[in-house]
Amino acid sequence: MKILIVEDEKKTGDYLKQGLVEASFVVDLARDGLDGMHLAKTGDYDLVVLDVMLPGVDGWGVLKAIRAAGKNMPVLFLTARDQVEDRVKGLELGADDYLVKPFAFSELLARVRSLLRRGKTMEPELLRAADLELDLLRRRVTRAGRRIELTAKEFALMELLLRRRGEVLPRSLIASQIWDMNFDSDTNVIEVAVRRLRAKVDDDFEPKLIVTVRGMGYVLEVPESA
Amino acid sequence: MKILIVEDEKKTGDYLKQGLVEASFVVDLARDGLDGMHLAKTGDYDLVVLDVMLPGVDGWGVLKAIRAAGKNMPVLFLTARDQVEDRVKGLELGADDYLVKPFAFSELLARVRSLLRRGKTMEPELLRAADLELDLLRRRVTRAGRRIELTAKEFALMELLLRRRGEVLPRSLIASQIWDMNFDSDTNVIEVAVRRLRAKVDDDFEPKLIVTVRGMGYVLEVPESA
DNA sequence: TCCTCGACGATCAGGATTTTCATCGTCGCC
DNA sequence: GGCGACGATGAAAATCCTGATCGTCGAGGA
């Protein structure tokens, strides 16, 4: 599987290339838009990882050129945290997925694999339950329209509950997903984390979404409407 | 590849089994020492994951029985944090590797794969440079004989530097190993972490082991003796 | 039925760790 | 010698974990 990375910042480029090579992909690295465009059009790549911010020809330019040349391999966009709007633009132009910097390498690898396997992924950008909304793109949460600030762990927990709403999640599952640890120690990190999350998303609202199931775990209860 | 897990605590057992099954191993689970002994002796396993603390026949008993029966598949011991001495005992009895609870599942999987591949792994238990010693088993550090307490991140960083002593480690590498993040954001976590580590292992000692290489990264300088 | 007990979960405060931010120092090039 | 980039440092702030204690649910017995 052959991948083209277009990234001007040296550190990031090298880092990505190294990681993907170690994951046994064949990787080319272009340092600017022009170079990237050229390689993308002539080389035979299965996927392109494309930074938006590039000197000279920017990410959109490269993407446009690729599509104009009739190539339709999946393109994974890299955008900065504060360039949210850019993503919309990228998606309209035919990007297949995006990743917000900074990201964990494991995250990139997962997206890359998924894109290569299924062709297109595109995660849902919004998770919702009742009046709670979780915007995965911007890492933002609102309930009843009110903005709520969550920390990393809180967000991860919220996301997990929301992705599997209606399911009772055993503590062991939560521990493995959020803490990546086996559950043998006598700690109550999970209870504490749930507490903090509830304080932010449930305490001041109705109905209560996070429900404890004694002896089982926690569920995000999806209110039966209709 | 067929794996036997001997673990009495239900949550842990199920969790391990599920994880290994998902990693496409064939897994049997024994809930106590007797059961485990029996299965290990009759079934044809490529590896055994063995909890030390078991009701009835404990981990060592099971291990002894396995070896006595002439089986010599690799055995991975699971020990609790405060049972350091147990490990020594386990290793003497012929365990091939150990893992301290609580551990990340990814860690277990890595060890399992490694044991299956190479037969026996047994990480080095001690890393050393000059008068600095890092005991991976007990997660302990001493310099010039003096015990030094390190936090999780500090230990991880110390271990990384020590494992690749003499090599200049670029920040991007460190970031990816210790923080699992790509290095695009403008943070100086690494500098701060290095600072804290130096305060503990270098400030009060000579020679200074952690050396900054301007524009490159950090090295653990191995003093040229002789 | 009611009461008691035990297990499980909730909650809070304290503390440890880690990150952020602002500022300072230093090296090397011009 | 001055400048600019890079790294070092210190302190504050945010986050997360630990441990202790309290509350509550439900089973089983009186």
Image (cartoon, coloured by chain):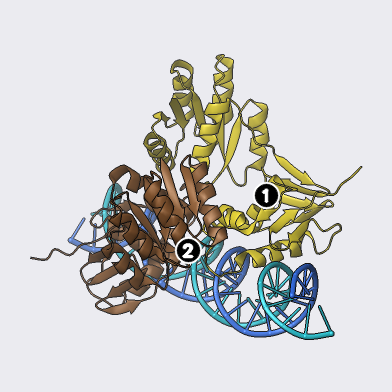
Chain colours: A brown, B yellow, C blue, D cyan
Let me know if residue A225 appears in the view.
Answer: yes
Q: Is residue B145 above or below residue B72?
A: below
Q: Quadrant of the C terminus of chain A?
A: bottom left
Dot 2, crowdedness within 10 Å: few (<14), some or many (≥20)?
Answer: some
CB of mark 2 within 8 Å of CB of mark 1? no
In this view, the residue in front, B201 or A118, is: A118
Q: Is residue B159 above or below residue A86?
A: above
Where does the image place residue B12, in percent across and percent down from the top left?
A: 44, 42
Q: Amino acid at mark 2?
A: Pro
In this view, the residue in front, B189 or A67, is: A67
Where does the image place residue B114, in percent across and percent down from the top left?
A: 55, 32
Residue drawn 76% across the image and 57% down it: B210
Left or right side of B192 for A92: left
Q: Is residue A10 above or below residue B55?
A: below
In this view, the residue in front, B99 or A103, is: A103
In this view, the residue farthest toward the left is A226
Residue drawn 52% across the image and 42% down it: A22
Q: Amino acid at mark 1?
A: Glu
Left or right side of A35 for B63: right
Helix, strand or loop for disc 1? helix
Residue drawn 46% across the image and 67% down it: A56
Left or right side of A120 for D22: right
Q: Which is more foreground, mark 2 or mark 1?
A: 2
Image disc number at residue A102: 2
Dot 1, crowdedness within 10 Å: few (<14), some or many (≥20)?
Answer: some
Numbered-mark total? 2
Q: Quadrant of the N terminus of chain A?
A: top left
Kindly identify which residue carries mark 1. Answer: B159
Residue drawn 29% across the image and 46% down it: A119
Where does the image place residue A217, in percent across and percent down from the top left?
A: 33, 54
